[in-house]
């Protein structure tokens, strides 16, 4: 296998270990700086130049894109994808995980634990947002911070509001997040490759520091991950569209709380604590997938007019309950069942003899008009929010009376 590692830090531990693991397995590997690529586009011929020379397309790439170059780095990764070069982490997956707000928005529609989080723009909304996440103490995070930078613990409402207003005045976007007290000073990092956790550590802060990042002096110890946490880590990685990542979780009283998903996880802390060859596991996985490039369904499906992918949930009382997939005659309606989700299990390419049960969800590809007639009405989820404290309003003045802000 010819492997290209996209990295600006060839001498860092993680990059060196990946190169070493690849060479030990007889693969050809090179390190290339993402910022030295030039993108070339013409009809039917997406291409790349590196240091002025046309790139010889590798079998696979492994992106190690730093925060400071996310935009250009993901553009390069996307160009490799258009050239049908395999990457375990797509440009969309990297971009989604790098933005803390975007990643939590994506996770929030799924039944997976996350700390209660708020995001506001107007200073008049800050106090209510703090109350909604549970009140102080509260965590304030920069949206694109990394390694614990831009994470602040505020223990009083007035302090939290002052910090947020100061950051807003400096054009910094921040998240307001519930402080999970039972997990203060520690978190769990699960290293996920495809559909399994290959290693896990608990990181513990030292002294009065509440941030447990190894880069901030946190101590890493190997752990056997509880199945509930392992399942949450794998689901989070799959939802985000990442095949190789580190999933950071808080140990809350209600179970795992996904804190962050890292698309370029460091290897030094987890290999040092566990003694495992994580780099070798990454290389072996990429080698096994190199001949199977990712397919962007959104691009491919536009070719077939009137066709698409959707979920069909089987409600209680449906005529399909008790029938096999074959008996539903979906195939005769130009609808193919790709997966069947039952409770927490997902069955890929289910057999035609499988009997359907209430609340089964079928992921189907087929004629959109036919699938539309099979959909049950969407059930609106009712949220239960705490009553908000009443805000005194000066007589004769409302928020709507405030002068509009310039764009």
Image (spheres, rainbow, N blue to C red):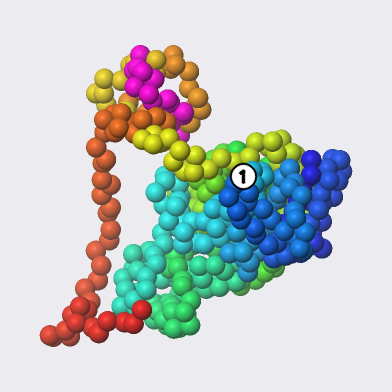
Q: What residue does disc 1 label?
A: 243
Is residue 16 visible in the rendered image? The answer is yes
At x 52%, y 56%, the residue is 96
Residue at (35% x, 69% y) in the render: 129
Quick check: can you spot residue 264? Answer: no
263 in magenta? no
Left-right relation of 275 to 348: right
Image coords of residue 131 (percent x, y): 34, 68
User: Farthest left residue?
Assistant: 396
Residue nearest the viewer, comparing 290 with 167: 290
Q: Residue at x 81, y 53 (%)?
A: 30
Query: Where is residue 229 shown, x and y percent of the image?
Result: 55, 44
Residue drawn where x is 42% and y is 31% of the image: 365
Which residue range is magenta in the image? Answer: 327-344
- Residue found at the far front of this picture: 43
Residue 27: give x, y in percent of width and height.
Answer: 83, 42
């Amino acid at each position: 296998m010819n492997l290209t590692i996209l990295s600006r830090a060839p001498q860092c531990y993680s990059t060196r270990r990946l190169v070493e693991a690849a060479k030990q397995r007889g693969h050809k590997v090179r390190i290339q700086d993402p910022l030295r690529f030039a993108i070339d586009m013409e009809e039917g011929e997406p291409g790349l130049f590196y240091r002025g020379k046309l790139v010889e397309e590798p079998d696979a790439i492994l992106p190690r894109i730093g925060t400071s170059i996310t935009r250009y780095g993901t553009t390069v990764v996307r160009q490799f994808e258009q050239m049908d070069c395999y990457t375990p982490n797509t440009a969309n997956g990297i971009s989604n995980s790098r933005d803390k707000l975007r990643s939590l928005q994506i996770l929030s529609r799924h039944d997976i634990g996350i700390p209660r989080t708020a995001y506001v723009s107007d200073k008049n909304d800050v106090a209510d947002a703090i109350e909604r996440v549970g009140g102080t103490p509260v965590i304030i995070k920069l949206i694109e911070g990394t390694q614990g930078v831009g994470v602040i613990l505020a223990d009083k409402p007035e302090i939290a509001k002052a910090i947020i207003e100061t950051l807003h005045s400096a054009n910094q976007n921040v998240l307001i997040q519930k402080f999970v007290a039972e997990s203060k000073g520690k978190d769990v990092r699960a290293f996920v490759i495809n559909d399994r956790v290959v290693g896990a550590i608990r990181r513990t802060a030292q002294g009065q520091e509440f941030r447990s990042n190894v880069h901030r002096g946190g101590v890493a110890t190997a752990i056997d991950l509880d199945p509930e946490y392992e399942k949450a880590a794998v689901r989070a990685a799959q939802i985000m569209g990442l095949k190789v990542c580190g999933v950071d979780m808080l140990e809350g009283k209600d179970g795992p709380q996904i804190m962050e998903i890292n698309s370029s996880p460091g290897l030094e802390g987890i290999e040092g604590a566990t003694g495992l060859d994580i780099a070798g596991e990454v290389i072996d996985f990429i080698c096994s997938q190199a001949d199977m490039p990712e397919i962007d369904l959104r691009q491919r499906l536009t070719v077939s007019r009137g066709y698409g992918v959707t979920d069909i949930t089987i409600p209680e009382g449906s005529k399909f309950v008790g029938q096999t997939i074959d008996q539903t005659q979906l195939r005769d309606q130009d609808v193919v069942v790709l997966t069947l989700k039952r409770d927490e299990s997902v069955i890929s390419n289910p057999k035609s003899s499988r009997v359907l049960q209430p609340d089964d969800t079928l992921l189907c590809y087929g004629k959109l008009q036919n699938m539309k007639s099979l959909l049950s009405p969407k059930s609106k989820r009712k949220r239960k929010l705490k009553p908000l404290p009443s805000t005194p309003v000066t007589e004769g003045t409302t928020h709507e009376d405030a002068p509009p802000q310039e764009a």
